[in-house]
Amino acid sequence: MSCYICGQPATSQEHAPARCFFPKGEVKGKLTKVDSCTEHNEETSKDDEYVRNIIAMTIGNNGIALSHFLQSCLKSFIKSPKLLSVTTKVRKQVYVQEKDQKEIKPTYAFQIDRQRIDLVMRKIAYATYFKKYGTSWNRELAIGTEYLLNKEMTPDDFGLLIKSAKSELESPTFEGTNQEVFKFSFQQAESDDTNDQVLIMKFYEGFEVWVFAQADTTGPKL
C-alpha cells in the first residue's frame, strides 16, 4: 500500500471527503478511503469541520445539506463557540435571489479562511485522483469556485474562468457512490497525460469546486 500524496508506504487510511461531510443515513455506499503515510495523515478534522459548515450553509444546495446543517453543523457551533466565532465573526448583510425564484431575500455573507478551504479541497482532489487512477496526482493544484466571492461580492479570476468555461462545455458526467453528498468528474485537457486534467467536484448537488492541474509542476503539494 502506498500513500495517496507521496507514494511512500502507507500506515493508515483517510476518508475523502471526510466522514463529517456525510449525514447519518446518507451513506448509501462505502465511503471513499485512501491509504496514507504517517506524514500525510495529518489531523485536519477541525479544518474538515470548518469547510463542511461553510459548504453546507451555502445557498443553492440540496435538502440534505440543509438537514445536515441543522442536525450536525449547528451542534458543532454549540460544542465549539470558538468555531462559531471563527466562522461568523466578520459578516455583512447581502440580498440574494435563489435559483428559479423571483423573490429577493436578505441573508448574511461571511468572511472565510480561503487557505483552510483550499487545503481541504486539495486533499480531497488528490485522494479522488488516487482512488480513480491508482497513483498520486503528480501536479500542484489550484482551487477555483464561483461560490466564494471577494470583498466586492464578485467572483475572483478563477470564478470568472469557470463561468466562461461552463458556457462552452457540455454538462459533465459525474461519478461517486454518494452523489447527493459528493460527486466528481475529470475533464481531460488537450494533453493525453492524465495528470493534466481539470477535476470538477460537487458537494450537496450545489457547491461546485474546480481543481486545476498546474502545468510544469511536479507535485503533489498540499
Image (spheres, helix red, strand yellow):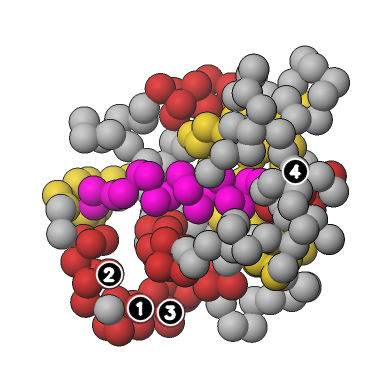
For the residues carrying marks 2 and 4, which lies nearer the camera in this image?
Answer: 4
**Picture coordinates of residue 195 (x, y %)?**
75, 30
Residue 16 left/right relative to 113: right
* Quadrant assignment, res 47: bottom left
Residue indicated by mark 4: 136
**Secondary structure found at label 3:** helix
Tell me, yes or no, whether the two marked residues, 1 and 3, touch with CB atoms within 8 Å.
yes
For the residues carrying marks 4 and 3, which lies nearer the camera in this image?
Answer: 4
At 32% from the left and 37% from the top, the residue drawn is 149
For the residues carrying marks 1 and 3, which lies nearer the camera in this image?
Answer: 1
How many C-alpha atoms fall within 10 Å of the one at disc 3: few (<14), some, or many (≥20)?
many
Q: Which mark is residue 72?
A: 3
Sequence-wise first label, 4 or 3: 3
At 30% from the left and 84% from the top, the residue drawn is 79
Judge whether residue 130 is colored magenta. Answer: no
Tell me, yes or no, whether the two marked residues, 1 and 4, touch with CB atoms within 8 Å.
no
How many C-alpha atoms fall within 10 Å of the one at disc 4: few (<14), some, or many (≥20)?
many
